[in-house]
Image: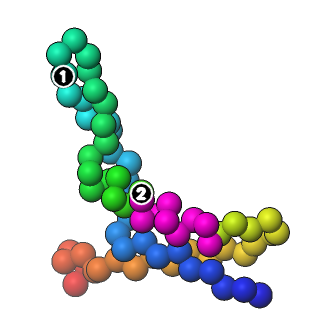
């Protein structure tokens, strides 16, 4: 079985779009930090062009909260 890894440094939730007035029009945009995260994931996606059933294992690693120590 071939192993493929998708690396994500920190999970980033999708923020609400931002709005900016430009004369008579309103321009909508997403924050730059979110777009950089999304571009990183998009860059890794061509490696995941799979047309067969897959087995998915997801591992999350988070630092311990101070209240748990």
Where residue 67 sits in the image (x, y, percent)?
Answer: 20, 75
In the picture shown, does residue 26 fall above or below 15?
Answer: above
Residue 69, position in %: x, y?
A: 22, 84
- What is the residue that sits farthest to the top in this orientation? 24
* Residue in the picture at 57% in, 65% down: 45
Residue at the spot 66% in from the left edge and 85% down from the top edge = 3
Q: What is the CA distance from the residue labelled 2 to the residue labelled 1?
A: 25 Å
Q: Residue furthest right?
A: 52
Q: What secondary structure is found at the residue carrying circle 2? A: helix
Q: Earlier in the sequence, mark 2 or mark 1?
A: 1
Q: Which residues are magenta?
A: 39-47
The 10 Å Cα crowd at callout 2, few under 14, some 14 to 19, many 20 or more, is few
The quadrant where residue 15 appears: top left
In this rendering, position of residue 27 left or right of residue 58: left
- In the image, is 68 to the left or to the right of 58? left
Q: Is residue 41 magenta?
A: yes
Q: Residue at image x 69%, y 66%?
A: 49
Q: Which residue is mark 1?
A: 21
Q: Residue at x 24, y 29 (%)?
A: 19
Which label sits on residue 38? 2
Magenta-drawn stretch, dominant element (helix, strand or loop): helix
Give the vertical position of 64 relative to 31 (above or below): below
Question: Residue 36: image x %, image y %?
Answer: 33, 59
């Amino acid at each position: 079985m071939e192993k493929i890894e998708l690396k994500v440094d920190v999970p980033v939730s999708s923020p609400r779009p931002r709005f900016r007035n430009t004369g008579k029009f309103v321009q909508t945009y997403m924050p730059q930090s979110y777009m950089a995260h999304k571009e990183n994931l998009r860059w890794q996606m061509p490696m995941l062009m799979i047309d067969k059933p897959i087995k998915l294992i997801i591992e999350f690693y988070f630092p311990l909260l101070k209240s748990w120590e």
